[in-house]
Amino acid sequence: MKIDRRLLLAIGVIGLATLVWLALTIGLIASTLAPAQLALVTEQLAPRLVLIGLTWLFGLMVISATLRWLFRRYASAPARLLEQTQVLLAAPRAAPLNHRGTKETKALADAIFQLATQRDHLRADVATQIALASQGVQQEKNRLAALMAELTQSVVVCNLDGRIILYNSRARLQFKALSQAPTLVGGAELVGIGRSIYAVFDRQLVAHALEAIQQRMNRGAGNPSAQFVTTTQAGQLLKVQMAPVRDAQAEGGVLGGADITGFVLMLDNVTRAFEEEHLRDQLLHGLTEGTRSSLANIQAAVDMLAYPDLDGEMRERFFGVVREELGSMSQRITDMTQKATEGLKARWPLEEMLGADVLLAAQRRIEARSKRSVTLETLDASLWLRVDSFSLTQALDYLAMRLVDEFDIKFFRLRLQANGNRAQLDLIWTGQAVSTETVMSWEMDSMRFGAQSTPLTVRDVVERHGGEMWFERERVRHEAFFRFLLPLVSAQEQFEATQNEQDQGRPEFYDFDLFQSTDQSRALEDQPLSALIYTVFDTETTGLNPSGGDQIIQLGAARCVNGKLLKQESFEQLVDPGRLIPAATIPIHGITQDMVAGKPKITKVLPAFYAFAQDTVLVAHNAAFDMRFLQLQEKNTGLVFNHPVLDTLLLSAVVHPNQESHRLEDIAERFNITVLGRHTALGDALVTAEVWLRLIPLLQALGITTLRQAREAAQKTYYARLKY
């Protein structure tokens, strides 16, 4: 533990004072002795000077221990109480101080806690009043969030600096498709609050579109917009519609350049549509050219057949030409029809739906068309399916109609339940048995509904869902059923879908305060801490010796923007270290060799993390340790993490120099932060992010307001001497 300099100074002064006192005492005694007596005393004491020195040293140690106890009790205790009080001032709610000191300082700590509790009650009352006053505003925000959640189009809102301030879940999925590492980051390196849209679009292209909008506004256009198509780095083709965000407080309604505070981008990935259109053009061109050639050959053959003196052999040859060209034309038309059907199947959207909703839709459709009763049984209301509900209900309706028309089935039942990682949907009836051959013919025939028809078959529908379908009999109950195995939505996707159905899950990803940000022209070092964007990260490793061959086995990170922790914009990835994980470390981080088997190497993960952390300040707890692992991979990846780095360990020592411990758990306890997922990379990163957001106001109270000042203050601490 670091020893206070004041204590060392006090011990030094007392030691020097006792030496002076001892020397003066010896001098005074010597001045009263006769020369013979002085010689005798000197002769007796000279061999015992070491004993006298040891006695003095022992006394000094006793005095030092006493001083240290008194200092901790009467000098450090008030300082620790001051630091704990500063934490209370910055904390959103009061937590017991658990102060260790004198009876008086403990009583003072209790009084401070009571005052803080009263403050929390007052804050709660004020918050209640504010909530009541802003209820109308909140309703508008909820309407906006609901609208954004239900939109099927990707929407991104940016300020004039190109920083994203709002995006919906559809945009997040769109950017995942644009990502160069979709399985590692899922597009998080491209989309996120505070991220630059220029990671996807060329800056000059956006500037040109904004200029076009400005010109339309100057001409008095009421709803100016611009459209453009661009190719992304991942090779995707995007169609973009841009609209301006204008200042609602523009005087007199005059629309000028100063009125634009940002822009809205509506994105549509047209890569597949473009490819399909190109394929259709090729098919039509091939059909046209092939048909023209065949018709010319047929016409020539017909003209020759018109000659009356044509012999039998030549006549048969020309008839053969006609038959061959007709067969060729028929085959081309068949091939085009087949490819068109495949394109139709490929365009079906598979959406996440509650299984109960799918069955209710099928029940209504079958009852309306067949005039038969349909009941639902064993309905698992918690199942979410990934289906094209229209084509699936079409297939069920088609099978039911065939049963009614050919076997006069009187009623049906629909049953849905889980079957492993898929859902099991049954169309059940009682009555005459159906042969397997009949079922196979129904499955392969194009579906028809009275006068209406579709080129699709039941087999097409099943294959499009990646599922299975078969026919079974239950002889005991005299029942039969068609069984469909359909894809289930994963547990995580079910959770997200359920959250989207709830009001509290509706607010999407936005931070309108970023509309106030100015041009990013100031040097990063001189920007206020509260204005910066942070990537808070942590690593789990095979050991504690990066230079000795230990490797990263997990990397996790979260982002902090505008004083908020964006938990939904996180990065978490297991890494194959290329070596065995020591058994002694597994109880700490819980990561086994099987868990990292088949995971990407660090050389694949770091480029994705580098993109995720681009244009941000890195924050970590004991950052020297984590940064050393990143630096050792520079030669292998060609990436240099030259981002500004802040260390919550060092900065905790800056704001709380009198605290005995600066371990992450102890800091979190001081700040009343709940620790979840300790010793997992993402869990520790989230806790570190919470700690960092609490440290910012405490640093500002000390006059440390910029990134430069924070880094300089951190380097002056005792813990900055740690090296790896």
Image (cartoon, grey):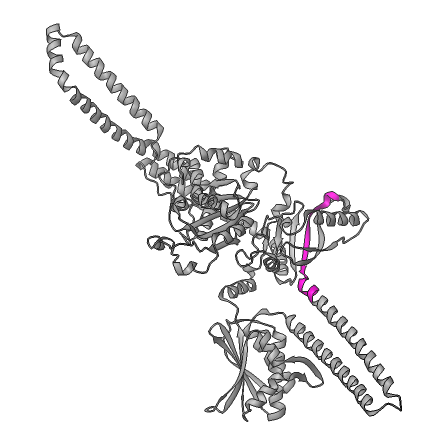
Of 52 and 21, which appears nearest the observer?
52
Is 278 situated above or below 192?
below
Residue 623 image position (x, y, % from top left): 45, 42
- Left or right? Give the position of 154 relative to 317: left
Residue 274 is a magenta residue:
yes
Q: Which residues are magenta?
A: 257-275
Is 298 situated above or below 208?
below
- Residue 602: in sight, yes or no? yes
Count of numbered marks? 0
| Farthest-out residue, top | 35
Of 314 and 686, which appears nearest the observer?
314
Residue 314 image position (x, y, % from top left): 82, 88
| Farthest-out residue, right | 308
- Residue 247: in sight, yes or no? no
Residue 380 is a magenta residue:
no
Say which quadrant the C terminus sits in. top left
Of 86 and 5, which appears nearest the observer?
5
Residue 523 image position (x, y, % from top left): 59, 36
Of 677 and 562, which appears nearest the observer?
677
Rendered residue at 63%/40% (across/down): 520
- Left or right? Give the position of 649 relative to 28: right
**Quadrant of residue 30 within the rendered picture:** top left
Say which quadrant the N terminus sits in. top left
Residue 548 image position (x, y, % from top left): 38, 45
- Left or right? Give the position of 210 relative to 645: right
Is 601 situated above or below 525?
below
Rendered residue at 24%/18% (across/down): 19
Rendered residue at 63%/38% (across/down): 521
